[in-house]
Amino acid sequence: LPMQMVVIIGGGIIGTSVAYHLAQMGVKGVVVVEQNKITSGTTWHAAGLMVTFGSTSETSTELRKYSKQLYRTLEQETGLSTGFRPVGFIELATDQDRLEEYRRVAAFNRFCGVDVIEIGPKDIVDLFPLCDTKDVLSGFYVQDDGRVNPVDACMSLAAGARMKGVQFLEGLEVVGVTSNRRSLHSGSIPRVTGVTLANGH
């Protein structure tokens, strides 16, 4: 590899997202090294759920909201769909403890701008007729949450990164990372100086 400012190991959803966002920030000299093909690891068989409900962390909730908006609009930038479908999301409470917990989570999520509503068993069946609600006390419903196609989302992020100059190298395995410090016990933080590829470069 030639000298790069940033080397990202792995071309799945995390690697392509990091590359995309670094490129959006104007970072130059970014390269993604993938041992097989983009999305060929665990990304391609992920569930692809894109939900904003469920966290009691403001940071996590804002990240979920940002991600949903990104997947909704990325096609306009890259020409490649993420497969985002706002089919709705329902979290079910089947005992009193869970109901109390989800009510707290819902209150916090509404404070963060997530449009979550509590619905009863009849409403749940109306929305999802296959659901057996005999043990369900309540559901917590976000109408515009949904799912993305993990492969499509990854490819769209990669396309956006390429448009900003990120280089993707497929079929290259990283077998080592070099640094300017031999040990963490020396009192200073190691700084990565390079990567070693299986082909010896």
Image: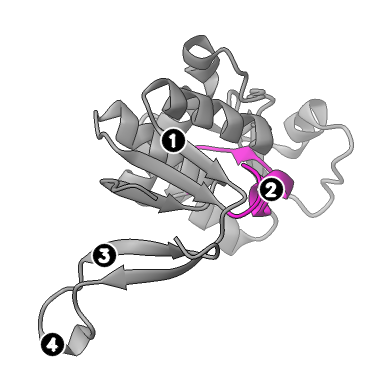
Q: Residue at x 64, y 23 (%)?
A: 86
Residue at mark 2 to residue at mark 3: CA–CA distance: 26 Å
Closest to the observer, 41 or 129? 41
- The residue that appears at 84% across and 50% down in the rendered structure is 134
Q: Residue 154 at what x, y percent from top left?
A: 58, 35
Residue of label 2: 40
Residue 51 is covered by the magenta coloring:
yes
The circle drawn on residue 167 is: 1
Q: Nearer the viewer, mark 1 or mark 2?
A: 1
Which mark, residue 186?
4
Of badges 2 and 3, nearer the viewer stands 3
- The answer to which of marks 1 and 3 sits earlier in the sequence is 1
Please give the range of residues in magenta: 35-54
Whether pointer 2 and pointer 3 mark residues with C-beta atoms closer than 8 Å, the reply is: no
The mark closer to the camera, 1 or 4, is 1
The first of marks 2 and 4 along the sequence is 2
